[in-house]
Amino acid sequence: MTEQTLILDGARVAQDIKDGLVSRVKRLSEQGITPCLATILVGDDPASATYVRMKGNACRRLGMESLKITLDAGTTTEELIREIQKLNADPNVHGILLQHPVPHQIDERAAFDAIAIEKDVDGVTTLGFAQNAFGFAAYPSCTPAAIIAILDYYRIPVEGKHAVVVGRSPILGKPVSLMLLNRNATVTICHSRTKGLGDIVSQAEIVVAAVGKPKFIQGDWIQDGAVILDAGYNEGNVGDVDYEACLEKASAITPVPAGVGPVTIAMLLKHTVDAAEKQLG
Ligand SMILES: NC(=O)C1=CN([C@@H]2O[C@H](COP(=O)(O)OP(=O)(O)OC[C@H]3O[C@@H](n4cnc5c(N)ncnc54)[C@H](OP(=O)(O)O)[C@@H]3O)[C@@H](O)[C@H]2O)C=CC1
Ligand SMILES: Nc1nc(=O)c2c([nH]1)NC[C@@H]1CN(c3ccc(C(=O)N[C@@H](CCC(=O)O)C(=O)O)cc3)C=[N+]21
C-alpha cells in the first residue's frame, strides 16, 4: 500500500462514548439513582479477573457503581442461577454481566438465560440475542456493538462489503456477524471446522478476528485495502491478528491494546446508563 494505514483509535472512540455519559449520570444522580453494573466472575482465571476489575474501575471513574460477585470454580449451574436471580430482584442493580467463558460444569446458556432481559446489558440472553439478530435489541452484545461503533466513528462503509468473521462465540463472533448482516454486508462466518480459512479471509473487505489465538490472522491472508477489526485479547496484550504483517496490507486496523477493548467497556457503561434511565420511566 502506498497510502498510510489508518489506525482505528479505540481509546478515542471510547472517550467519545464516555463523554456522552457524564451529563446523563449526573442527571440520574440528581434523581437519587446511581447506575450500577453487577459483574459475575466464576472461577479464578487471572485474565478474566483483570477484565472484571477494569469494568469496575471504569464504572467508578464515571460516578457509577459496580457490584462484583466472585464465585468459586466449583460453583454449580443452580448456585450461579440463584445468584443471578438475586441480582434480578435487586432494584439497585441495573445491568448484569456474566463473564464468559464459565467453567465446564456450568450450563452457560441456562445461566445467561437466567438474566432478566431488562438487565441484559451484554445481550447474552436468548431473547436479547434474537432481538439483536432482528436488529432491534435494546442492548446488543458489547464487543460486537463496539466493533460497529468503531466502523461508524470512522465512517467506514459496510453496505455491500464482504465481511469475514473468524469465530462464532455467543458473545462475539455470532452476534457481530448478524450486526454486519443487518448493515447489509455480505457475511462469511468461519470457525474451527472451516476449511481453507486463508483463502476465505483473502476475499474479505472487512475482517473481524474473534478467535482467541494470538497472531492467528496472517498478513498474507489479507487483501490490499481491507479493514481489520481485531477483537482478540490474549495473554501479554496480544490480539488475534499478526498486527505488523497485516498493517502493511490493510487500509485501516484496530491495534491491541487501545482498539476494540476500551470501546467494549464504554459500551457496557452506556448500556448500564440506558438501563438505569429506564427505571425513571
Ligand atoms: N475486547 C473485548 O472486548 C473482547 C475480547 N474477547 C477476545 O476475543 C477472542 C475470542 O473470544 P470468544 O469469542 O469469547 O472466544 P471463544 O473461545 O468462545 O470462541 C472462539 C471462536 O474461535 C473459533 N476458532 C478456534 N480455533 C479456530 C481456528 N483454528 N480456526 C478458525 N476458528 C477457530 C472457535 O470455533 P468453534 O466454534 O468451532 O469452536 C470459536 O467459534 C479472545 O481473544 C477473547 O479474549 C472476547 C470478548 C470480548
Ligand atoms: N460476557 C462477557 N462479555 C465481555 O465483553 C467479555 C467477557 N464476557 N469475557 C472476557 C472478554 C474480554 N473482554 C475485554 C474487555 C476489555 C478489554 C480492554 O479494555 N483491554 C484494553 C487493555 C487494558 C489493559 O490490559 O490494561 C485494551 O485493549 O486497550 C479487554 C478484554 C471482555 N470480555
Image (tube, grey):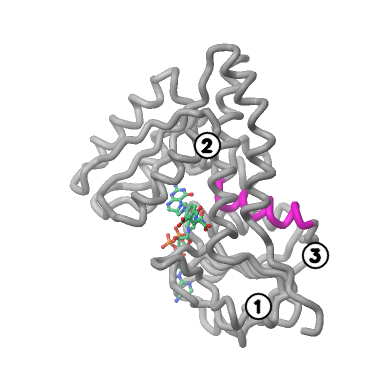
Question: Is residue 65 shown in magenta?
Answer: no
Q: Are marks 1 and 3 in contact (CB under 8 Å)?
A: no
- Above or below residue 227? Residue 260 is above
Question: Is residue 162 shown to the viewer in this render?
Answer: no
Q: Is residue 222 left or right of residue 152?
A: left
Three-letter amino acid code at disc 3? Gly
Which numbered disc covers residue 121?
Answer: 2
Is residue 67 left or right of 254 when viewed as pictured? Answer: left
Q: Residues within 10 Å of mark 1 (few under 14, many from 20)?
A: many
Residue 144 on the magenta segment: yes
Q: Residues within 10 Å of mark 2 (few under 14, many from 20)?
A: many
Residue at numbered disc 1: 247
* Predominant SS of the magenta segment: helix
Q: Which residue is mark 3?
A: 160
- Callout 3 environment at 10 Å: few (<14), some (14 to 19), or many (20+)? few
| Cα separation between marks 1 and 3 | 23 Å
Point out the stretch of residues depicted in magenta: 141-154
